[in-house]
Image (tube, rainbow, N blue to C red):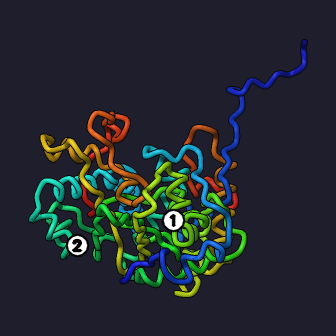
């Protein structure tokens, strides 16, 4: 509840600072698109929908997401944020016994095959998977 | 030249799904088959956060606070209820606190752990808000972060950094710019940028703004369902 006051306390010692300096990425104006690619919007919405349905609380979700974001190797520009979001969602679904990684791999491969079998310009449907 | 020439239109090109797009589709397929999501509801959530909820909502809250001292007091006391009274309710806005800039104190919001953010008033956070350097440097070196946004505050101004959580989210209420006494709420709202409600900017000054640049004409204020 209480604010962090960088003017006082250990957090405020610039000598103790670590990590990369903050740089505003190019193209981050107020009208920058919220999602860089459609799948980012979809995976964002999946977590929101599942939280609404009560599969997990938002605190549970925030804990899972921050654990993934805290892993070493996260991109400094935040460009991999929704990849972490996806990984966190997969991890939480596995914990809840909803979807195992293997089944996600299999359905994902089916979608890739369906995409290959779909002529350009037509909507990709899972029914187009030749191995289905 | 007699060899076969395959014109692009003669044979269809394959579609490619990048691995992340394919995995998200796979999740959607599995969750739909299990009856855990309704694809139409998922699309509605996307529509809401891409087009309906955004900083324009927060700008109206700030403008009301500037124009109406009673509302301002209410916002300071119970931000969740005051914001809800303007119709901005819903996800990630359940527990809000408004922090007011003063002559002595400038407020800055961050989520050091992940990306908690007041969606109902500001929409989905910008990429930089979610990037590791902002999440760490906002706490360690807030003046350096503000400088990157072109914001230089007097040395005497105290900077308070508010770390959002899944339970409590903050929005900054900037000081009303000078020479705005004759502006109505609509005009005041146009001075309020997203960044000034995060604390990485200041409101625009009258005359310096181009509303069409700031808020795309297609953007509509709305509430999360």
Where in the figure is residue A58, as x and y percent of width and height? 41, 79
Q: Does residue A110 show up?
A: no
Residue beneath disc 2: B80
Residue beneath disc 1: B142
Of labels 1 and 2, earlier in sequence is 2
Point out the image quarter for the C terminus of chain B. bottom left
Q: Chain of mark 2?
A: B
Q: Chain of mark 1?
A: B
> Could you classify mark 1 by the number of other residues whose Cα lies within 10 Å: few (under 14), some (14-19), or many (20 or more)?
many
Q: Residue furthest front?
A: B156
Left or right relative to A91: residue B92: left
> Could you classify mark 2 by the number of other residues whose Cα lies within 10 Å: few (under 14), some (14-19), or many (20 or more)?
many
Q: CA distance from mark 1 to mark 2?
A: 27 Å
Q: Is residue B62 above or below residue A71?
A: above
Residue at image point 48% right, 69% down: B115
Q: Is residue A126 above or below residue B215?
A: below
């Amino acid at each position: 509840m209480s604010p962090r006051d960088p003017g006082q306390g250990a957090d405020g010692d610039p000598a103790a600072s670590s990590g990369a300096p903050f740089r505003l990425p190019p193209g981050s104006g107020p009208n920058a698109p919220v999602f860089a690619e459609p799948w980012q919007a979809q995976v964002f919405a999946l977590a929101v929908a599942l939280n609404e349905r009560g599969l997990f609380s938002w605190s549970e979700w925030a804990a899972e997401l921050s654990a993934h974001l805290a892993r070493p190797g996260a991109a400094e520009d935040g460009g991999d944020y929704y990849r972490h979001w996806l990984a966190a969602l997969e991890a939480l679904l596995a914990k809840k016994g909803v979807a195992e990684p293997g089944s996600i791999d299999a359905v994902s491969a089916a979608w890739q095959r369906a995409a290959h079998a779909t002529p350009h310009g037509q909507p990709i449907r899972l029914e187009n998977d030749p191995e289905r | 030249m007699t060899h076969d020439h395959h014109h692009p239109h003669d044979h269809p090109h394959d579609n490619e799904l990048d691995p992340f797009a394919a995995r998200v589709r796979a999740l959607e397929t599995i969750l739909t088959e299990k009856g855990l999501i309704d694809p139409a509801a998922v699309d509605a959530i996307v529509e809401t956060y891409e087009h309906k909820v955004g900083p324009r909502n927060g700008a109206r809250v700030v403008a009301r606070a500037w124009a109406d001292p009673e509302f301002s007091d209410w916002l300071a006391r119970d931000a969740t209820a005051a914001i809800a009274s303007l119709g901005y309710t819903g996800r990630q806005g359940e527990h809000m606190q408004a922090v007011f800039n003063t002559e002595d104190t400038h407020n800055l919001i961050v989520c050091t752990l992940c990306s908690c953010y007041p969606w109902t008033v500001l929409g989905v956070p910008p990429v930089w808000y979610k990037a590791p350097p902002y999440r760490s440097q906002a706490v360690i070196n807030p003046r350096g972060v503000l400088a990157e946004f072109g914001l230089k505050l007097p040395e005497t101004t105290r900077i308070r950094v508010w770390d959002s959580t899944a339970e409590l989210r903050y929005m900054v209420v900037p000081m009303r710019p000078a020479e705005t006494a004759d502006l109505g709420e609509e005009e005041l709202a146009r001075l309020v940028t997203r960044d000034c409600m995060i604390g990485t900017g200041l409101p625009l000054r009258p005359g310096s703004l181009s509303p069409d640049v700031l808020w795309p004409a297609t953007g509509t204020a709305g509430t999360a369902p």
